[in-house]
Amino acid sequence: MTLSTPQGAAVKARSAFPTASLLAAALLAAGLLTACTETPVSTPVIEVDADVALADQPIVIRVSDLAPSEEVEIAAEAVDYLEETWRSQATFVADDTGVVDLTRDAPIAGSYEGVDGMGLFWSINMVDNPDEESFFRLPYPEVARDYEVRLIVSTRGGSAERVLRRGWLAEGVTHRHLDVGTDGVTGDLYMPPDADGANPAGVLLIGGSEGGHGPKFAAALLASRGYPALAVSYFALPGLPDQLRDIPLEYFAKAAELLPGPVHVIGYSRGSEPAQLLPALYPDLVRSAVLYVPTDQIYASYPDVTGNAWTYKGSPQLEIPYERIDVPVLALTGAMDVLWPSAEAVRSIERQTGGRAFVYERAGHAMSGLPYIPAATTVTHPVSGQVLLFGGTRAGDAAARHQAWHEVLAFLESAQA
């Protein structure tokens, strides 16, 4: 106690009151100090098993030095290529040892539910529009080899931050943009460090009706795992057709020939059509086929649906000759895909090829992406401008992306022989 009195008065005042320790003891005995005997505050410590990792690698996140049963908010923030800030958050209760482990503990509130060690990563939304579940706008791998995710932990006693880096290109992976005018095809080629030595077979990735640059991020990650990978572009770019119309299958064969072969082909949505036609028409060129949210039939041109999508030797290709497909096939989709009947198609493909099939509950068309990246269940199509419903739930898509990616990696490895 400090009194604004002369020194003698201050001494006299101190002698008139019990010492602080005696006062506290008296109040405790009387049960009057409950407000001062709460669980002590703490400064949290963020523990991770990897500050830098590939974007498809899960991270173990723990927060320690908490008080037992203390509530703690853990948030994740990232900035997209338009410099929009995205954020997720969840509230947890520490265990008896003062620890929260995201691989073990479910949040009591927040942007995701249930035990999910990577829930903070796929559940982020734009800060300025938090109710819109959207795709996180990532810069292309050749523009930025990785991106930051900032972890922010807040408790009554303080806060802590830690920056993680999520990468696309492992050390030594190279990128080259191909142009149809000089290379015969347009696309993005990613090569692992030992590209001139003994390598696994290459992977040709074919995107869907969105056109444009193709599945670059998956190609970059596959190259980071040792596979020469080419994300081929086939319309809606300079030098290429404006629409998905009369695309010659010879174009994809030429792209495959740029890779060590026979190649694995991965087709997404409409890209699943050429991914199935290639092994039927070029059996010596293709080693295996992976089909995300596929169809088992040939659809018309897009967005103008009055023409044909694919040609071979100048003739339209109107059906998939399953009797001629003699390579391992893996087909994956979501049970709640409402864009088209891909779940029925996956079962049909399984029957007709003898391949493997996975249909994930609560997932929709957007399950055809990479794990731990935010997705959307409704999109505006970049070519047609239509608003498309993908179906499923964001959590279902996230779970399916995680499981499907591991199935794809295991399938590619098994199909190497």
Image: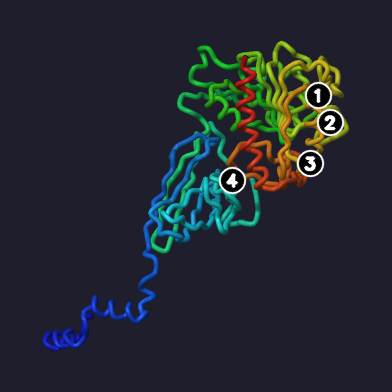
Number of marks in the rendered image: 4
- Residue 339: mark: 3
Give the x, y percent position of residue 366: 69, 41
Callout 1: few (<14), some (14-19), or many (20+) C-alpha neighbours within 10 Å? many
Most extreme residue toward the front, as rendered? 29
Q: Check disc 4 and report its element: helix, strand or loop.
A: helix
Q: Nearer the viewer, residue 312 or 66?
A: 66
- The picture places residue 330, in percent across and down from the top left corner, at 71, 26
Q: Kindly indicate whether the residue at mark 2 contacts the one at mark 4 (C-beta within 8 angstroms).
A: no
Residue 201 in the figure: left or right of residue 296: left
Name the kind of residue labelled 4 in the image. Trp
Image quadrant containing the N terminus: bottom left
Marks 2 and 3 close (CB-CB < 8 Å): no
- Which secondary structure lies at badge 3? loop
Which disc, if any, is residue 299? 2
* Element assignment for label 2: loop
Picture quarter with the C terminus: top right
Q: Which residue is mark 4?
A: 122
Q: Answer yes or no: do the residues labelled 1 and 4 have beta carbons within 8 Å?
A: no
- Residue 208 appears in view: no
